[in-house]
Image: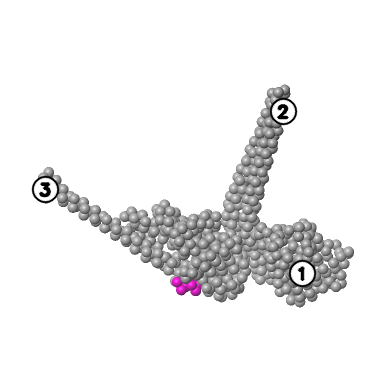
Amino acid sequence: MLSSTGHFELPAMRIFLICLILNVLQLGYAQQSAKTLNDSALRLYKSDPKAALSLFEKSLNLAKTNTTTFEQARAKNGLSLVYRDLGELQNAIANAQDVLVLSTDSILQASALNTLGVAHRQLGKYETSLTYYLKALDIYIAKKEKVKEATVTNNIGMVYSYLGVNDKAIDYHLKAKVVFEGLNNKKGISEVYNNIAIIYANDGDLEKALDYFKYSLDIETEINDKKGVAESANNVGAVYYYMQEIDSALAYFKASAKMEREIGNFAGIGATYNNIADLLLENNRVNEAKHYIDSSYYYAEQSKVAFDIESALLNYSKYYEAKDDHGLALEYYKRFSKLKDSVLNLETNSKIAELEIEFQTEKKEKEILLQRTNLAEKELDLSRKNYYILGLVALAVVLLLLGYLLYNQQKLKNKQLKRENQLKDAMLQIETQSKLQEQRLRISRDLHDNIGAQLTFIISSLDNLKYGFNLPDTLDKKLKTISAFTSSTINELRDTIWAMNKNDISLEDLQLRISNFIKKANIASENVVFDININTTEYEDIKFTSVQGMNIYRIIQEAVNNALKYANAKNIKIDMLAENDHLNFSVVDNGNGFDISAETFGNGLNNMKKRANDIGGTIDIISNDNGTTVSFRLNKTVF
């Protein structure tokens, strides 16, 4: 139809409107389709992560084609969750970071921040992880998202658990537990109990840890969370392993590995196969172990998890040692040590560089401050001379008064500068102590993971020599002596790590450590009756330094060991008493005794005296035919 001007106005307008409507409908359909795919994938990602991965990818492609940014961000967030659970941490991080760029939706951003926290925690970057968790927590608190708030709170507890700050870790876990139980959120309850069980396991309470892990496994099975089932089964197997119930441990490890294969989690498969290989090697099932070592190394390489690669290399070394192929055993151990050292040196050098920069900055600030003080003093002297010259006659009194006022002003200025220096020194000392504590914690972990592993390797190698060769009696006895000495060294190392992990040691901590030592001594010495008497209620709030606590513990340990080794005692009594202004420790036995005047003190007795003297205490040793008494006394002013 023509208009009066000859243009196709009405049909053109109709065509434009029809096209516009079609585009709107198409965009709306694309948005709805992407949303449907995302919703379906979110329902599946725990029970069937592979299917969820495919749906999220389809949703992302559809959303990109039609520029639906919100659904793109949802798809990216879903991908980050699946990759996180599958152990593909770099993919998880990349997708979570894309969410932060694509979306301004605070809930989506909080989810991505939580994923970044989980991924960095698994990579061992605990400070970065905690930063992301706290940002996510702020958003969920503001939005009153109770379940998600509790989830992040529980995750923060895991960071403190990895750092060895168990009190703070349990506090966060219990906060999360209250919320989850109030909402009857079974997944959340399972994760809380699983994390608390890890802390119990690390503290040596295996029975309690096993109960919590099994409870977590039952819940994960009920809700059909395959990733959760795999992790909980692996944890139950690990506890059975530590309890030396080998068949049960293997059954749970294999069930965990099967589930990890189903969901395609390479990191989980590698870790579980390492556990199985380690168990088989320790129980002399060497030929069975080889298959699992090969598989664990393959999957660890795929997932790029450094700890699992280290474990596989160490298991290769143990395997070839057991097969008497000492050349390959040494080669794999060197590769293990090189990888371990490369991670350690990177962290250590970075921290040293950071401390060096801070120290140099503080030093420069002090030098500048000192120069300013000297300059101010010189300016004051010059000003005084000028005033004296100009005011010799008429203004002498005024100038003297002015000089006096200026002197007081400078004095106050110097006092202020001095206080500022003292404040900076105090802040530097606090910061240095904090850095030292971090270094002590890192060193103690390195001692446990590196030196402890090497000593255990020595014991294993000695046992292999004894069982693998027909050795002469003299050499066999010598190897047993070396093995016993190495085991003793491991125990000493654990005591040292215990002291290093603490800024201070409470009297209760010390008493518990001594009681545990007495229990072990009682088990090892069946014919000796131990009696321990503790009455220190007046001094419950005492805090020792780690050096004081370790020296007291070593004195009592040395006294008890001497009574067991040399006195042939039937009864040993240990007293810890608070009397007046003193804390008294004593070890009394009814053994043979010895002539102190004729005795040339060996290293043990000299060490006790030196330890007592180092922490400001006094020690007395009395011995006769009726037995020996070692008394150690500390004045309360010492602590």
- How many residues crowd mark 2 within 10 Å: few (<14), some (14–19), many (20+)? few
Q: Is disc 3 surrounded by few (<14), some (14 to 19) or many (20+) residues within 10 Å?
A: few
Q: Circle 3 sits on which residue?
A: 2
Pointer 2 residue:
397
Front position in the image: 479 or 25: 25
Under mark 1, the amino acid is Asp
Earlier-in-chain disc, 2 versus 3: 3
Q: Is residue 362 toward the left or the right of residue 104 in the image?
A: right
Res 591 quadrant in image: bottom right
Identified at 87% across, 70% down, the residue is 624
Give the mark, 1 or 2, whose residue is nearer the N terminus.
2
Q: Nearer the viewer, residue 226 or 433?
A: 433
Crowd tier of the residue under label 1, counting other residues whose Cα lies within 10 Å: few below 14, some 14–19, many 20 or above = some
Percent across and percent down for residue 120 are 51, 57
Q: Which residues are magenta?
A: 217-223
Query: Mark 2 or mark 3: which is in front?
Result: 2
Numbered disc 3: secondary structure = loop
Residue 122 located left or right of residue 597 = left
Residue at 35% x, 61% y: name it.
35
Which residue is drawn at the image coordinates 16% and 48% (left, top)? 9
Q: Nearer the viewer, residue 119 or 565?
A: 119
- The residue type indicated by label 3 comes to Leu
